[in-house]
Amino acid sequence: MSKTEIPYKIYLTEDEMPKAWYNLRADMKNKPAPLMHPGTHQALKAEELTPIFCEELVAQELDETTPFIEIPEEIRNFYKMYRPSPLVRAYCLEQKLGTPAKIYYKFEGNNTSGSHKLNSAIAQAYYAKKQGLKGVTTETGAGQWGTALSMACAYFGLDCKVYMVKVSYEQKPFRREVMRTYGASVVPSPSETTEVGKKILAEHPGTTGSLGCAISEAVEVATKNPGYRYVLGSVLNQVLLHQSVIGLETKTALDKYGIKPDIIIGCAGGGSNLGGLIAPFMGEKLRGEADYRIIAVEPASCPSFTRGTFAYDFCDTGMICPLAKMYTLGSSFIPSANHAGGLRFHGMSTTLSQLYHDGFMEATSVEQTSVFEAAEMFARIEGILPAPESSHAIRVAIDEALKCKETGEEKTIVFGLTGTGYFDLVAYQKYNDGEMSDYIPSDEEIAASVAKLPKID
């Protein structure tokens, strides 16, 4: 197919939007290990999860057999305000790199939250409203999830309490103000407002926080306040389910032009964007219908996949949440204060961890300065200022395209551009001023944290 036959942006019609989410676990022979009670070490039952999560979301979390779950009409109508999102051919980037590779990116920044997070936020808020709850609590790293959830809660008239990782709270004041504009209360984590927050601060004075810390605080508040439930922006099966709209749209757009990707790349913090993007492609791979090279990209400062241990661990630093079997650096691991706040989680989705463990995908880690080098190149060439998280995928997409230049292979590369970086200008400033550094945790640091993993018989 010639270059002129494929438009710069491939848009779908409203009729082509997914009407059901795809549950990747239904096609997995080796299912993700179940969530485990931290006290009894037994698989958690639905009734044990409903005090934390909304009832319908618990059902989605535990469903491993239903391949497609219908998207309620109210959610589909909300999606239509910003979906379908475009699949963009990066012609200008290809030309600049001088590569024979064809590069596409799925752009999820076309909404006020600025990222893909709204796809799950609106779903979780919908089920909370349907259950008759007063409000929800959550954590946020870089702020995209908190922003998305505050928007969704405002839409359904729900109270929204956000615990924001302290380093991001300080680095991204404008992201914080967007949340407050939509009616959310925002607290820097760890804080003195919860028992677990006080404990973390006592053990780690001056800490800049982590997603694990913020999760602990949000869960504590949800379980102690009647009419509230906790919602999470990544990691959980239910979130990957909702985010499958990204991959379903991507595949439909590619299929319209007879395009089959060779390499699919996504940034990975907890797994929501990556899991959503690769879902239908991984499904084909699991069923033996097609093969793809799938690459998860994580920061070298928080390398859960590439240097983590596949084991049961707490999802939160305060060790009050259920245990999940995942690739983890240990729940006590607190990453350096890098600028990819959404990728600063010590563990990874149980679904993606199982797929990685079984060899269906690969992972790589990249350093912060090289990520921002790729981000600025992309901004100057493609005209979009990318989020630091997204830029991890951009870095590896560029690297793979340059490999094609060396070998002469005409591979097709697809990556997820999860959102925009217009609230991340402090990070760009530090990079431009030469004040940004790369931090890679030592083997000793990781070993000390992993040594604290819960002992499971």
Image (tube, rainbow, N blue to C red):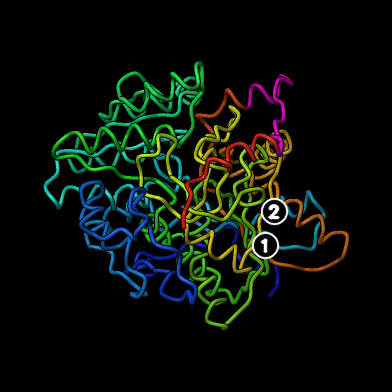
* Image quarter in which the N terminus is found: bottom right
Q: Regarding mark 2 in the picture, which secondary structure is present there?
A: helix
**Residue where numbered disc 1 is placed:** 413
Are the residues at dot 1 and dot 2 in contact (C-beta closer than 8 Å)?
A: yes
- Picture quadrant where residue 340 is located: top right
What main secondary structure does the magenta stretch of the protein show? loop
Disc 2 residue type (three-letter): Ala
**Residue where numbered disc 2 is placed:** 397
At a point 28% along the width and 26% down the height, the residue shown is 185
Residue 244: x and y in percent read 43, 62
Q: How far apart are marks 1 and 2 (CA)?
A: 7 Å
Residue 64: x and y in percent read 36, 70
Disc 1 residue type (three-letter): Ile
- Picture quadrant where residue 4 is located: bottom right
Q: Which residue lies furthest to the top in this view?
A: 206
Q: Residue furthest left?
A: 132
Q: What stretch is highlighted in magenta?
A: 428-443
- Picture quadrant where residue 216 is located: top left
Residue 145: x and y in percent read 40, 40
Q: Residue furthest right?
A: 406
**Left or right for 347, reference 49:** right
202 or 121, which lies in front? 202
